[in-house]
Amino acid sequence: MKKNILIGLVIATLFTIQTAFAQHAFQKYYPPTDTLVQKKLEWWQGIKFGLLMHWGTYSQWGIVESWSLCPEDEVWCERRGEFSKNYFEYKRAYEGLIKTFNPVNFDPSKWAKAAKEAGMRYVVFTTKHHDGFCMFDTKQTEYKITSSICPFSTNPKSNIAKEVFNAFRNEGFGIGAYFSKPDWHYPDYWDPYFPPFDRNPNYDLNKYPEKWNRYKQFTANQIKELMSDYGKVDILWLDGGWVQPMTESSPRWGRVPNHQDIDMPKIVAMSRKLQPGLIVVDRAVEGSNQNYLTPEQELPDTLLPYPWETCMTIANSWSYVPNDTYKPARQLIHLLCKIVSRGGNFLLNIGSDPNGDFDPIAYDRLKEIGKWMTLNGNAIYSTKPIFPYQAGKVVLTAKGKSVFAIYLIDENETELPSLIKIDRFSVKKIKRVTIIGSNTSLKVKVLEKGIGIEIPEKHRKIGIDSYALVFKLDI
Ligand code: GLC
């Protein structure tokens, strides 16, 4: 009996992971035909490492972003705290957070500098999450950071998204606008007359087509504002994949999924008129408006043969949660190397606290990654994957006449092996092998199944803050 339950649980878990992942990573890819988009994608594939930020009024409660408003029986929708027992009281209190949001420490140039030092080269910022609170000065709703009932509205930096984009652009970053298609505040998505029953609209779209039309217009207007008034934008990162036309094969989310067509082709055409070459990521919506795919919190097993990006949290939550557990620098660096070796980009998420700053641990992590990237960035930026991508503890990248073999060092490893084997790897000729950061040439052995790099005794000792060692093979 117990065993059956266990097997059931394992299957259920596998199934959930599989479906969550499948929606983001293993859909069919439709390459763009617009040459400007192709060019921008190529640029984007070269910069490899970006910062995702989730920030909103919810950070004041230190809870998961938006999801506690969603009346689905899922762990991530759980309500906590004094208002949790009554849904409607809870929603009122959550939305009331606008009246106390006052992030006086907000200084996006500090974030941009720290991210740049870490080697990041693009940013994706939540202009609006599912809760509908706008971190930009939209004209379409008063539920926004610049509303007169929000204390931060009098601050000269109150148009937060604009300030973030400007600060990062000043540091040479590519700019990405995260925008949630669903909006749980707007009355034409969740009509206050009806109780919401899941993440989807709470009314029948066929019965109230004029409502849905208003919603479409509202969404298009907001996106138009972001594409018009916020300088050059490189990526429109659209979340809330359940807002999509329902077809035979489209995934089902929530209890009452429905045909949520918002005329995406029209929105994309309008956006590209304003931002030529714009990369659009209509996440989890199979088709030509998903210029790259976005596995979430996942490292694909091997190379994915299309542009893709893993988005992942630096701690456990997308939003700021006090005392969250941050991933160690070693793990983050290894993830970056593995993702890049499989042909992807790494979009690492940090949530800001309610006052407008990161946890000090986040800055430590960025510094540590930066130390590694300053020395070894050449093995990351503008590289291409090369077979077999990974061989044991070695991951491979390639650029021009160089192959980089990145040896991922374990936490307690104090000494390198005398021979580092790279199984299944072969090239016609290797002219020279060096360790990045030192000029010594190393010897290479051709083995039956690949190659081996010989490590002389005096180079075997591993320092405690050494996370990954890069061998440069000139071919
Ligand atoms: C998940 C979360 C959502 C978050 C997104 C970022 O889908 O549910 O809140 O914005 O990941 O990738």
Image: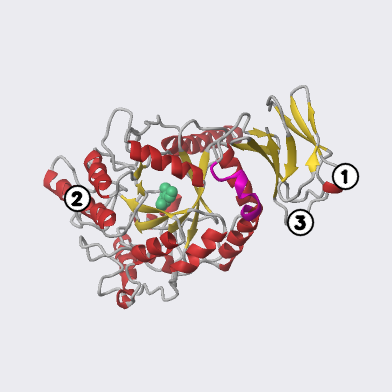
Residue drawn at point x = 26 percent, y = 43 percent: 268
Compared with 393, 196 (above or below) is below
Identity of the amino acid at label 3?
Answer: Ile
Would you call the spot at circle 1 few (<14 residues within 10 Å), some (14-19), or many (20 or more)? Answer: few
Name the quarter where the N terminus is drawn.
top right
Q: CA distance from mark 2 to mark 3?
A: 55 Å
Marker disc for residue 145: none
Residue to which mark 2 is pinned:
215
Left or right of 22? Residue 244 is left
**Residue extending furthest top?**
448
Residue to which mark 1 is pinned:
457
Residue to which mark 3 is pinned:
464
Q: CA distance from mark 1 to mark 3?
A: 18 Å
Most common SS among magenta residues: helix
Q: Is residue 379 magenta?
A: yes
Left or right of 162? Residue 418 is right
Compared with 289, 318 (above or below) is below
Left or right of 42? Residue 421 is right
**Residue extending furthest right?**
457
Identity of the amino acid at label 2?
Answer: Tyr
